[in-house]
Amino acid sequence: MTDDSQRNFRSVYYEKVGFRGVEEKKSLEILLKDDRLDIEKLCTFSQRFPLPSMYRALVWKALLGDGLPQRPVP
């Protein structure tokens, strides 16, 4: 329960009763909002949690190197 102690207790409860995806969508949105995508974190996230269908193609393109549109550097 080392990973579970880091997470919200509601997430652990929902996962035990079969409801996943409550906090995962918010976490994925935070990962995608960053200026530079952290491919390592994105890869780990996609292995641990199911990807919402609205982000699935975007995440897989980023992971496979097809890339996201380049963000302008300020």
Image (cartoon, rainbow, N blue to C red):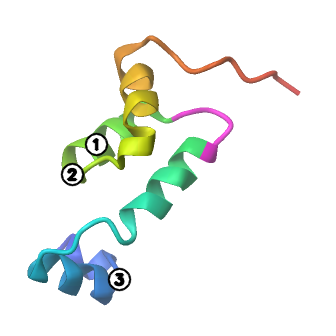
Q: Which kind of residue does numbered mark 2 sit on?
A: Arg
Q: Are marks 1 and 2 in contact (CB under 8 Å)?
A: yes
What's the magenta bit mostly, secondary-structure-wise? loop
Placement of 23 over or under 27, stated as above or below: below
Q: Residues within 10 Å of mark 2 (few under 14, many from 20)?
A: few
Which residue position is annotated with label 2?
A: 48
Please tell me whether mark 2 sits on a helix, a strand or a loop: helix
Figure disc tally? 3
Q: Nearer the viewer, residue 55 or 33?
A: 55
In the picture of the structure, the residue carrying the numbered disc 3 is 8
Q: Callout 1, which amino acid?
A: Ser
Give the numbered dot on residue 23: none
Measuring 63% from the left and 45% from the top, which residue is drawn there? 33
Task: Name the secondary structure under disc 3.
Answer: loop
- Residue 47, magenta (yes or no): no
Are dots 1 and 3 in contact, CB under 8 Å? no
Residue 41 spot, x, y in % from top left: 39, 42
Q: In the image, which residues are magenta?
A: 33-37
* Residue 9 in picture, x, y percent from top left: 29, 88
Residue 34 in percent (x, y) is at: 63, 43
> Residue at image x 46%, y 30%?
58
